[in-house]
Image (cartoon, rainbow, N blue to C red):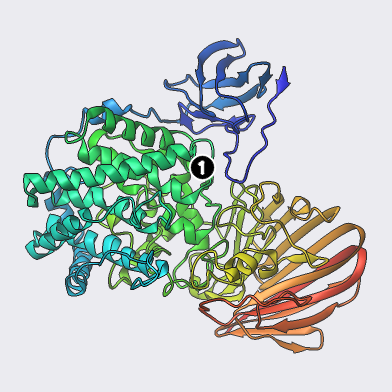
Amino acid sequence: MKQFRQKRSPSSIFPAPENGEVVELNPLSLQWVAEPGISLYRVRVERLPQQETVAAGTTAYNYFRIRRLLAPGRYRWNVASGDAELGWREFEVPASARPFLVPSAREVLARVPDIHPRHIHYRADLPELRERHKPQLEIIRRNVKLALSQGFMRYPDFYRPDGRIDYRRAFDESRQYFDRNLVACALAFLLLDDREAGQYAHEAVLRLCEWNPAGPASVYGQWGDEIGLSICRVLPAVLDWTWHLYTPQELKWAADTLARHMEQLWERVTGAEFLAHPGNSHVGRLPGYLGEAALVLYGTIPDETAERWLNYALEVYGSIFPHYGGRDGGWAEGPFYASSYTKWYLPFFFALERHCGFSFLEKPFYRRVSQFFLHFAPPGQEAHPFGDGNWPTADEWPGFQAQDPFGVYAERFGPPEAREFSRQLTGAIDRYELHLLDVIRPRPPHPEPDAAGPASDSYCSRDTGLLSMRRCVADPVHDVAVLARCSRYGTPSHQHADQGNFAVLAAGKALIAPSGSFGYIFGETHHRDWTQQTVGHNCILADGKGQPKDSAEAVGVILDFQDDGRLCRAEFDLSAAYRMLTNYTRTLEFDREALLLRVTDELEAPGETVIDFRLHSYARPVAEKELVRLSRFPASAEIRLRSTAGAGTFSWTDRFRHPGGGPEYPPGRQLCDQYHLNWRFPACRRLRIDAEFRIFLA
C-alpha cells in the first residue's frame, strides 16, 4: 500500500505513540497527522507476537481512543484509508501504566447532583475549604474591596470611531473586571457569605446579560476574542456560586446568555477543526469552558446539548491535549504562555474530579510540568525565555505570567523545591490578578508528592525542545542559568524564529536574553518584524537572513544532552532552520564550577556567505579590544569571540534595526532597556565560531 504523507502544518499534531514507545497510560490514544482529502480512517490495534486484534474501528478524526484496558505487553497499530496507510508502529504497555479510562458524558452527568453550588465545590466542602485557605481568603477580601471601589465595566465600544477606549484597553478592563473583580466577589459570597460581594456579582452578571454576544463580547466575531474569552472563562463558575441570588426570570436570562456564548465556542472549535489542528492557542482554551458550562447548566438546558458540549471536552482532554505540552513536562510556547495555558482548563478538571473521581491530571505532562517551571519560572527571574512574553511582563499583562505557576502541579506531584517556590510566590501576593478560579483548590484526591522526580540542576524537554543548565536550581539568588531552545515544533504561533536561541541569567538578572516585546499590542510591526524574527534573538544571520517564521519545517534537532555534575553539554542540529546553509550545528557547554559557558557554531554554506553572530542584553555593553563586558548587579559577564575567519567586526546599538541597516522597528511600548550586539564575519563557505562567556556574581 501507499504511505500517508504525514506532512505537518504549523498547527498539526505529532503522531503518537512513537514507534517502540513504552506508554504511561492505559488505555491510550493513537494520533496521526490528518491527510488531505481523507474523510474516514480504518484503525487496527494488534497484540504481539500473535497479531490478535484487540481494538479496531473507523473514525473521521485523526485520533483514535482505545476504550478498554489493555493487558501488559507489546502491541502494534496501523491506520489506513483506501489504498494508503500510515504503516505499522509498535508500542509497549507496561504493568506500571496508569489506568486512564475516560468516562463518557452520560456517565459524568449521571453523577452531577441537582443542587447548587456544585461547580468544583459542593456546599458540604465549604467548611474545610475555609479552614485550609485562610491566607487566600484574606487576599480575596482585599480583591473584593478593590472590586467594590471600581464598580462595573461599561460596554466596550472600541469598535466605534469615537469609542471611549481602544481594543487593548478594553482587553485590560475585561481581565480586571471579569477575571479578577467578578470572580473574587463570587468566591467571597460562596466562602465568606459576603452579601455585598454577592450583590456585586449578581448585578455584574445581569449587566453582562445586556451585552450582545455577537458584538465585541463575542469569541467568534470580527473585533478580537479576548473579551469574550474572559466572559466564557468565568461565567459558569460565577453563575453557579451565586445561583440562589437570582429570581427565576433572571436565572433563565443568565443561563440563556451563557448557553449562547457556549454555542459560539462550539462553532469555533468545530469550525477550526481543533482536534486535527490544535496549534491555535486561543481555541485551545475553549474545550474546558464548554465542559464547565455543561456541568453547571445541566438540568436547565436540553440533555443532548449538555452531552454534546461535555463529550467534546472529554474527547479533547482524553486524546490530543495538551498539544504544546510534552510528556516530559515542557511547554513548547515557553514559560510565559505555559504559566497561563496550564491553568485555563483546571476548573473543568477539578469539577470532573469532584463529580466522578476521574482526573485528567494523570497524564504525564501534568505530573512533570513542575520540573519545567523549576527551571524556566523560578521566583525572582526577570526574564522568561523563550517565545512571546519572555520579557518582564508584570506591568504589561498583570497575572498572565501567573503569580504562582507551580500551584496544583507542585502540590500534587512536584519535588520539595517546587513546593517551596510555590510557597514563596504565593507569600508575595498582595492581590490576585487573573487566575482566581484555581486559588481555592479542592484537596488533592490522591496526591503523590515527588512523582515528578527529584529536582536536578539540568533539564531537557526533548518533546518541546527547551533545555536548562543551572548552577543551583534550588537557590535562585546564587544561581546561574543557561537556557536554550531547539524544538521539533518549528516556529509557529507564539514561538519565534529562534532555533538554537540561548539565554544567560545570573541571580535572576538577564545578561543574555531574547529582545523585543509585544509593544503596545500583539501583532504590531515591532512584534511581528523584530520580536518574532531571528534578528531579535541570540542566533546567527546568514547574508542578513534568519529562520522562517510560522514554519513547521524550520525545526531544531537535539543531537546530544549530557550532564556529569560539573559540565553540562548540549548539541543541536539547526540545518533545517537555515535552509540557505548546507550544515549548521551549535554546541553549548556550561562549566558550573568555573561559571563558564562555551558556545561553538560550526556551519557550511553552498557559497560565500556573510555570517552575523547576534547577542542581546538588558545590560549596556562595554567593549575593550576583543572583550565585551556586561553588568547587571549583582551579576556580570565577559564575552570573547574567536573564529576561523578571525575575531569579526563588533558593533552594538540600542536601536531595533538589522545589522546591515534598513528600517527601524521601535516598540509602541518599551518595558526595559535592550542592547543588540553583533559580530560580522567575512564571507566564507565554512566557519567555526567559538564564543566564551565568563560569568561573575558579586
Residue 83 in the image: state x and y as whole percent: 68, 16
Viewer-side residue, 239 vs 490: 239
Residue 95 in the image: state x and y as whole percent: 48, 26
Give the mark count: 1
Q: Is residue 268 visible?
A: yes
Q: Quadrant of residue 486?
A: bottom right
Q: Is residue 646 above or below residue 40?
A: below
Looking at the image, the residue that sits furthest to the front is: 161
Other residues around mark 1 within 10 Å, as few (<14) / some (14–19) / many (≥20): many
Name the residue that disc number 1 marks. 278
Image-based side of 49 in relation to 327, left or right:
right
Disc 1, SS: loop
Residue 239 in the image: state x and y as whole percent: 18, 49
Image-based side of 675 in relation to 372, left or right:
right
Quadrant position of the C terminus in the picture: bottom right
Quadrant position of the N terminus in the picture: top right
Q: Is residue 187 visible?
A: no
Image-based side of 213 in relation to 362, left or right:
left
Q: Quadrant of residue 348?
A: top left
Residue 667 in the image: state x and y as whole percent: 56, 76
Look at 64% across and 86% down and name the residue there. Answer: 620
Q: Is residue 309 above or below residue 253?
A: above
Viewer-side residue, 484 vs 144: 144
Look at 31% across and 69% down and name the residue there. Answer: 427
| Three-letter code for the amino acid on which mark 1 is drawn | Pro
